């Protein structure tokens, strides 16, 4: 598979210096930028999916008028948290 090049980004010298100051041992600027871009892409993908699920839920509510009381949702989430807590304690 061929690779592609991300366009160069011009930044102020101060930002470049800050970036170079936080690079890990043997980490290159290219590796840092690639990692940052990958994380940003993943964050945006997850965010878009979140919004899509929310919009689908809203449309379903508008269509049916059926909803779940917030207290029921919170109780269910609390039960999941407690179950997971017990699993972790049992390790």
Image (cartoon, rainbow, N blue to C red):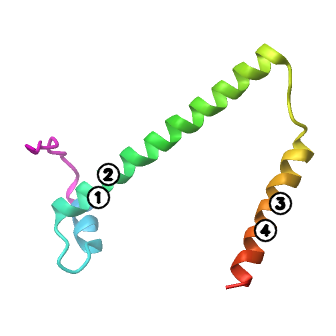
**Location of residue 8 (image quadrant):** top left
Contact between labelled residues 4 and 3, with CB atoms less than 8 Å apart:
no
Specify the quadrant that holds the C terminus.
bottom right
Disc 3 marks which residue? 78
Cα gap from disc 4 to disc 1, whole angstroms: 35 Å
- The local secondary structure at tag 3 comes to helix
Question: Which of 39 and 91 lies nearest the eye of the viewer?
Answer: 91
Say if the magenta span includes residue 35: no
Q: Which mark is residue 35?
A: 1
- Regarding mark 4 in the picture, which secondary structure is present there? helix
Cβ atoms at labels 3 and 1 below 8 Å apart: no
The residues tagged by marks 3 and 4 sit, at their Cα atoms, a distance apart of 9 Å
Q: Quadrant of the N terminus?
A: top left
Q: Residues within 10 Å of mark 2 (few under 14, many from 20)?
A: few
- Dots 4 and 1: beta carbons under 8 Å? no
Query: From the viewer's perspective, is residue 7 above or below residue 35?
Result: above
Label 2 – label 3 distance at C-alpha: 33 Å
Q: Mainly helix, strand or loop, the magenta region?
A: loop
Neighbourhood count class around disc 3 (C-alpha, 10 Å): few under 14, some 14–19, many 20 upward: few
Q: Residue at x 64, y 26 (%)?
A: 55
Residue 53 position by quadrant: top right
Between residues 31 and 61, which one lies in front from this camera angle? 61
Return the x and y of residue 48 as percentages of the image width and height. 50, 35
Q: Residue at x 84, y 53 (%)?
A: 76
**Residue where numbered disc 2 is placed:** 38
Q: CA distance from mark 4 to mark 2?
A: 33 Å
Q: Tell me the magenta residue range.
A: 1-13
């Amino acid at each position: 598979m061929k690779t592609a090049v991300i366009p160069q980004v011009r930044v102020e010298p101060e930002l470049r210096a800050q970036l170079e100051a936080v690079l890990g041992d043997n980490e290159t600027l290219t590796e840092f930028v690639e990692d940052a871009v990958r994380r940003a892409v993943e964050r945006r993908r997850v965010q878009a999916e979140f919004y899509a699920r929310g919009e689908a839920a809203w449309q379903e509510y508008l269509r049916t008028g059926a909803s779940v009381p917030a207290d029921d949702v919170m109780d269910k989430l609390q039960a999941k948290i407690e179950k997971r807590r017990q699993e972790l304690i049992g390790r």
